[in-house]
Image: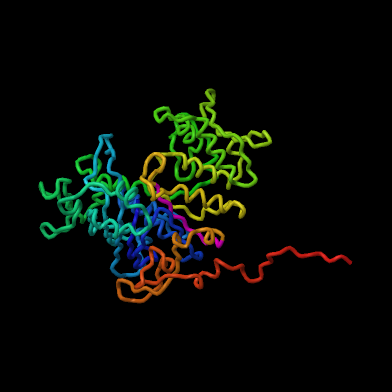
Amino acid sequence: MLTRLEISGFKNIIDLQVDFGPFTCIAGANGVGKSNVFDAIEFLSHLASESLVEAAQQVRGPAGTRGADPRDLFWDGYRDHEHRITFAAEMIVPQDVEDDLGAPAKATTTFLRYELELGYSAAESASSVGRLTLLREELRHIIRGDAGKHLRFPHSAKNFRNAVILGRRSGGAFLSTGERDGAVVINVHGDGGSFGKPQPRPAARAGRTVLSTVTTNDYPTILAARREMQSWRRLALEPSGLRAPDGFADPRSMDSDGRHLAATLYRIANDSAAGVDPDAVYARVADRLSDLSGVGASELSVEPDQVREVFTLFLQDRAGLRLPARALSEGTLRFLALCVLLEDPTFTGLTCMEEPENGIHPANLPAMLDLVQDLAVDVGEAPGTDNPLRQVIINTHSPAVFQLCDPQDVLLAEVRPTRSAAGTITGGLTLLPFRNSWRSDPSHPSFDTADVLAYLAAPAGAQLTLPVEVER
């Protein structure tokens, strides 16, 4: 669970600190940089698995394309000046994880702060591009006694906090940055605290973060942080992915674009190890899908075709009409995919969703938002099979979605004058909390009702009533 994110020098984010709860809605006009927050989270997730080059190429470039030039990631990246991106992420990590060989690992402590600084090395020739460089990397624990100060969102200390903030650390950092023979090194420290010598890794020519190189249970807490960051995803459900057929040999976990919807639901409904009743699973999904007006699902099931070796998801409406999932509308398919994820106890971690209202009839927006919020963990209870540790962040420019959200959960995205690292004043993304909410701080800007009238009032010239015909 990502509880705090600090970003500097990334795209149009010059200096940003933001606290996250189980559910957050980032609202703002087009073009202010709301998606850049998701890009930063996604970039950190890729950096936990891939090389610096590969991670950079996974982040959207200008105009939504895949960027190959790493300067796309930096604020004012094409001007001739020093380039720096810094990240800090405070997170709750799982205590029990598996390494890349399937061996179990147990983190020493589960509340951590990860810091990363990247630079840019210019191209060595006209026919090549520059590269990202690793400048600093730190991973430290946050002591349990300070957890209440860091977890600012309303929650149950007894049921939630004590269930997720586990273990203790007697030593220093798990990753630290130092110098050896005049060169920067990243020191890897064991979970035994001050026992044993740190293992230095040279940073100058590192092709990836040191955290991403920890693949075995020799360093269980670093591995747990890596697993947590790998679980941060951007969910972009696409009709083509949702309608794609699933073969018996295909993965049985849904991709970020919605592929393997049928195979995922079949796996959930037929999990014999968990003692699941398939009919009950299908009934719950059909019942939730019926929250959409106009759908009226009475039955839902996934049928394996032994001849073609494919799974087909069928929906039967109240009139008895039986339809395969590929015949459903785009909005219905997206809603159905979220219903399936709600039933999946293995679907955990952080999910970022762009404009969940897309393709949804205005009358169905409350049902969609309720579903998205229900995906997030209930922080009044301990996480478990029936309350998976999930976190959801959405962004929107829809007044309807804004009005349906609790103001406590909303961050208003604006471009405001911000001082850059070079000392100049320029426009940078800010995320403003609602005044007097748990995120607000008297020393920092916030928003109130007067600042968001565009989201609360009908647009000028709108016809809110049908014209009345006068008899002659």
How far from the left and from the top, in percent, is residue 364? 59, 51
From the viewer's perspective, is residue 414 above or below residue 242?
below
Q: Which quarter of the picture shows residue 75?
A: bottom left
Count the labels in the image.
Answer: 0
| Nearer to me, 370 or 235 | 370
Kindly report the secondary structure that dominates the magenta region of the rendered protein: strand
Q: Position of residue 471 (x, y in %)?
A: 87, 65
Q: Does 230 sit left or right of 30 as displayed?
A: left
At 58% across and 45% down in the image, what residue appears? 291
Camera sees residue 49: no
Specify the farthest residue to the top: 307
Q: Is residue 450 visible?
A: yes
**Placement of 126 over or under 381, stated as above or below:** below
Could you tell whether 234 is left or right of 139 in the image?
right
Q: Position of residue 99 (x, y in %)?
A: 27, 38
Instruction: Residue at the far right: name it.
Output: 472
- Identify the image quadrant of residue 255: top left
**Percent x, y of residue 303:** 54, 29
Residue 122 is a magenta residue: no
- 398 within the magenta span: yes
User: What is the span of residues highlighted in magenta in the rendered image?
Assistant: 390-399
| Front-most of residues 339 and 405 | 405
